[in-house]
Image: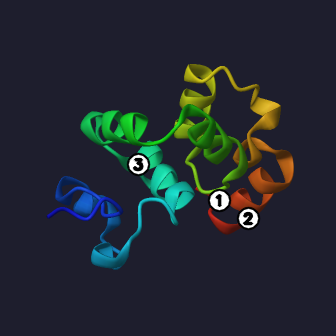
Amino acid sequence: MKNPNKLPEKLKPLFWDTDFETLDLHKKSHYIINRIFDKGTIDAIKWARKTYHEDVIRFSLMKLRDFSLKSATFWATIYDIPFNQMTCLQEPYLKTRQQLWPH
């Protein structure tokens, strides 16, 4: 019997740095959404959009800081989220990112 709180095996490559077997799709929903929407394939994103309510996805997109700038602007456009509501696109975070990774 499948564990309903476990991610599909096809997503394992996205979570190479995480204990995939213990990753609970409900308890770690924001982390999972962040990883999939930032680094996932189209199939992974389709799975996430079927699995998580749009409000949970929007909240994750707006509040998490770990999206690449390219992903953040893309998903903000898709979900019609103003850039000024995306934490990862705010000036303090952008300055920190530039200091840590000036390339």
Instruction: Specify whether 81 is left or right of 1.
Output: right
Viewer-nearest residue: 12 or 68? 12
Residue 72 in picture, x, y percent from top left = 60, 38
- N-term mark: 3 or 2: 3
- What's the distance in space between the residues labelled 1 and 2, CA to CA? 6 Å
Mark 2 and mark 3 in contact (Cβ < 8 Å)?
A: no
Relative vertical location of residue 16 with respect to residue 32 in this rendering, above or below: below
Amino acid, disc 2 = Gln
Viewer-nearest residue: 31 or 100? 31
Q: Which residue is mark 1?
A: 102
Instruction: Specify whether 103 is left or right of 63.
Output: left
Amino acid, disc 1 = Pro
Q: Nearer the viewer, mark 3 or mark 1?
A: 3
Mark 2 and mark 1 in contact (Cβ < 8 Å)?
A: yes
Which quadrant is the N terminus positioned in? bottom left
Q: Which residue is mark 3?
A: 36
- Say few, some or many: other residues with alpha carbon within 10 Å of mark 2 (under 14 / 14 to 19 / 20 or more): few
Task: Look at 32% across and 39% down and name the residue there.
Answer: 47
Residue 82 in picture, x, y percent from top left = 76, 25
Relative vertical location of residue 80 with respect to residue 68 in this rendering, above or below: above
Q: Which residue is mark 2?
A: 99
- N-term mark: 3 or 1: 3
